Amino acid sequence: MASVDTIRMAALLGICVVNLPFMGLPTEQAMFLPEAGPDRLAALTVAWMFQSRFFLLFSLLFGWGLQVQLASAARRGVAYGASYARRLAGLALMGVLHGLLVFTGDILLLYALLGALIWPLRQSSPRTLVRWALAMVPVAMLALLVVAPYLDQYADASLPEASLSGMPSLGGSYVEATRARWADWPGTFAMLVLFQGPMAFGCFALGLAAAKTGFFNAESTGRRRLARWAPWCLIVGLAANLAIALAPTDESLAAMLGLLALPVAAPVLSAAWLYLILWLDDHLRLPRVLVLAGRNSLTAYLLQGIIAGALFGAYGAGLFGKIGQAGLLPLSLGVALAAMLATGAIAQRQGRAPH
């Protein structure tokens, strides 16, 4: 379905915008707003419009894909459980390797685990799946309360750099960068489970429901309902997420409220982006090479990290820590585009990119 490929393409772009600072800067610089200037404006833009928004769209499509695969297996009269288990095992292995060798913020292992958890809900009604998604909102809030104390350690500028998980060595040789990833990945993955896990699972459930109701069909009831609500989602989502992005990073009540608002505000803005992407897909004809990249999104996602490693590591261009947030924002768009063009070109030549 072309619209789904377009959403994947947009999600890849947004994910790269969020991830690149964590590959090109020390963690404490990537996680929090600079004091002033163009770097602050760029970081604020990413925190406001991208962070925790586009991975939700990616998660939505994972759930959608599960139902599509189940329906395909049913039409062929074959069981899908064993094949799905093998897919999840392969995804988990790829996630571990990606996290240790390329990018510690990998989401593939998390998706494999959540994919196993969503399996028992595969026969649930759309209404039940929506209820599961809504139930993840308070779960996400509780998880963020657990995460909050660990975020504070990065906000404390008095901490010596050496105690901040060794991230600066990402700018060293490939061996040094890999050692840094090995040291940092377990803690980073635990943070991802808490920070992204509940919200991603909720979107898995919504994606499964979307496939069951034919949401992505142009004239579906769900599409019409989204069109009615999209202006409000955009207005409320932009306002709420700007407030969250500007919230302090200390232990104040305002900081805590900003964190707790994220599981509500982020999906609202994601819904607005979803509508805008679908509208663009209806009115614009995108180059086939980019559509193919969306169809082969796993390859494009992995290529983003590989390209970034070549840019920031000493074994490549050695740009780690040398480009501020203002430079990383346009660079992330270039990295995402390069990864998608390469993926699309491979798919055009071979019929499909590795996935």
Image (tube, rainbow, N blue to C red):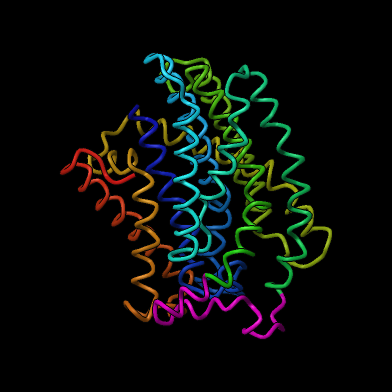
Q: Is residue 186 left or right of residue 249?
A: left
* Quarter location, residue 339: bottom left
Q: Is residue 258 above or below residue 11?
A: below
Q: In what quadrant of the picture does the C terminus appear?
A: top left
Residue 232 in the image: x percent, y percent?
A: 60, 33
Q: Nearer the viewer, residue 269 or 170?
A: 170
Q: Which residues are magenta?
A: 156-181
Residue 231 in the image: x percent, y percent?
A: 56, 32
Q: In what quadrant of the picture does the N terminus appear?
A: top left
Q: Nearer the viewer, residue 10 or 240?
A: 10
Q: Nearer the viewer, residue 221 or 351?
A: 351
Q: Nearer the viewer, residue 29 or 122?
A: 122
Q: Is residue 253 above or below residue 177?
A: above
Q: Is residue 173 left or right of residue 284?
A: right
Q: Is residue 196 above or below residue 7?
A: below
Within the magenta stretch, is there residue 227? no
